[in-house]
Structures are given as C-alpha cells and as structure tokens.
Image: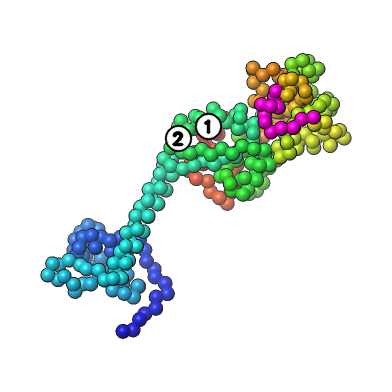
Amino acid sequence: MQLRKIDRVDMDIRQLKYLDALITAGSFTKAAERLNMAQPALSQSIKRLEQELGVTLVDRGANKSSKTLSLTAEGSALHQHAKLIIKNMAQAEAHIKSMANLTMGEVRVAVPGMLGSFYLPRRLMAFRHRHPELKLSLFEGGTRDTLKMLQNEDVDIAIITANDLTDEFDSHLLLQEQMVVAVGREHPLAKSDAVTLEEFFQHELVFFKPGYFHREWMLEQAEQLGLTANIAFETNLINLIKQVVAQEYGITTVLEMVIEKHDNICAKPFIPPIFLDLHIAWKKQRPISQADRAFVEFLMLNR
C-alpha cells in the first residue's frame, strides 16, 4: 500500500458540519434532508474532504443490510475533533453576539485621580444601571500613569489631557474644567477675588507627587516666571490634600469640581483664568469594542 503525504488541507467548518450530520443521521439521504441540500452535493462534499485528507472517512460498504453508515478509524478520529470544533465555534459565535448586543463585555478605562473621585462616580453608576451585564474596570492614577496604560494597551480607553494627545489616538473632548487655587477660609488669599501665579508661588504648597499633570504644569509655570515652588507637602490622596489645605498648612491648585460645599476651603480662580481640556481617548490602531464604544457615547451624552 502506498502512503500519501499530506502537507496542507483546506478544510472548512461546513465540511465538518456535513460529516457530523451524516453520522448523526446515519445515511446520506437523511443527512441531506436535515441539511436541506441535495444528496449528490453532500456526497461530493464528503468525497472531496476524503480526497483532501488522503484517507477514507466513511466505510460505504459496511452494514449494507441495515443501510447505516460506518466510520473508518480516521473518520471516527476526525468526527471527535469535528464535534469539539463545532461546539467551540458555536460558543465563539454566541460570545461575539453577546458582546455586540452588550450582554457581555468589559470596559477597561484609566482616569486621573480627581476625575475618578469627583466626576465619574455618579456617571459610572448610571452606566452600570443601563448596562448591568457589562463589567467596569477602573484604573485611577496620575496623568502620566493613565497615558502609559493606554499606550501599553493595559486599558482600552483613558481620559487624558489635551497636551498628551498625539496622532496615535482618536478622542473626543470630554470636558473643560477650570483650575482653581484652594485655600483655607482664614488664609490671606481667601479674601482675594482671584490669584496670580506670582502670588500663588509665594506660599507653601501642597502638591501631588510626580506623575500628575497639575504638578508638572505648575512647576513649568514657576520656571518660566523665574520662581521656585515651595512644596511643603506632597501626596496623591486628594482628601488628605484638602484636609491639609483646610487646616492652612499650605495651599494647592485643583480642578474646580474637587471643592465641595461642605469643605472648609475657598476656591479662587487664577488671573488670567486657567482651563484644562480633558479628552476621552483610545488608540487608532486598536479598534475599541462595542462595550467601550457604548461607554464613550454614554459619557459624551452625560457630560
């Protein structure tokens, strides 16, 4: 007997489904009826598969009295693989359909600390209420951290500053928020209507640690003015920053949204006013999922 070497087989899922239907039905006639196709076409498809594989799958001479088909050893082995492949394909199709219909999926988003604590909570809960089947994974950190996570594809979308936008991203402008000076209610600057950068840098400062846009931007301004920023206290804990400022151990600058009515803090605008543009962004070369797209659209509608 001469053995044939098989280098590559162009097998598709339909052929495997035909084989499975043939074995389940027990005959070409019944299988063709179940598949809603002509019997000769089914026979040709199985024959073509055998030719491609170089083996006989169906023993057409066996069990003639019962008119049922019998598989060869190769046919039985292929059928076991076929059943698993058909099952996995059905599961994959159901999974993708669930993701497309927003009944399954995960939104991975990185956000700056201030937005994660003061802007997003209510919106996140509203989004979860609308799409309870979706999983939300929120990563909070400095602006440098959120940018790096997006670039490394540790997250699918991120909220970043306009300064960090490059050609590698698609984005929407999410919000424009004013940067304000935060001081204790008895602090001398509390009586001012607005504060210049020169006045700001005359006081002891409470800043975020390196990696936050606010810190980097303010230090750049100090350098341009030929001034030195006197950083007396640094932490990434926003509530701790607010407590330190309220007790007048220093002053800081934050987004206006951070100052709440019950805080023992005054918010004063800079003069001239300073605004920060924040964008929701994703990588151009990595299409976002339906779940991510739904989240972006929801935020844009509920800014």
| Residue at 57%, 44% in the rendered image | 155
Where does residue 120 sit, x and y in percent of width and height? Answer: 57, 31
For mark 2, give the secondary structure. Answer: loop
Badge 2: residue crowd in 10 Å (few <14, some 14–19, many ≥20): some
Q: Quadrant of the N terminus?
A: bottom left
Q: How is the image coloured?
A: rainbow
Residue 238 within the magenta-colored segment of the rendering: yes
Image: magenta residue range? 232-243
Residue 191 shows up from this direction: yes
Residue at the limit of the structure toward the bottom, as seen here: 1
In the rendered view, tell whether residue 27 sits above or below residue 161.
below
Q: Earlier in the sequence, mark 1 or mark 2?
A: 1
Residue type indicated by callout 1: Leu
| Residue at 57%, 40% in the rendered image | 109
**Residue indicated by mark 2:** 131
Q: How many labels, in total?
A: 2
**Residue indicated by mark 1:** 124
Left or right: 287 as drawn, with respect to 178: left
Residue 303, by quadrant, is: top right
| Residue at 70%, 37% in the rendered image | 212
In the rendered view, tell whether residue 287 sits above or below residue 61.
above
Residue 171 shows up from this direction: no
**Mark number for residue 89?**
none
Where does residue 270 sit, x and y in percent of width and height? Answer: 76, 25
Labels 1 and 2 touching (C-beta < 8 A): no
Residue 164 within the magenta-colored segment of the rendering: no
| Residue at 73%, 39% in the rendered image | 210
Residue type indicated by callout 2: His
- Measured Cα–Cα span from mark 1 to mark 2: 10 Å
Where does residue 20 sit, x and y in percent of width and height? Answer: 28, 61
**In-front residue for pair 199/106:** 106
Left or right: 237 as drawn, with respect to 8: right
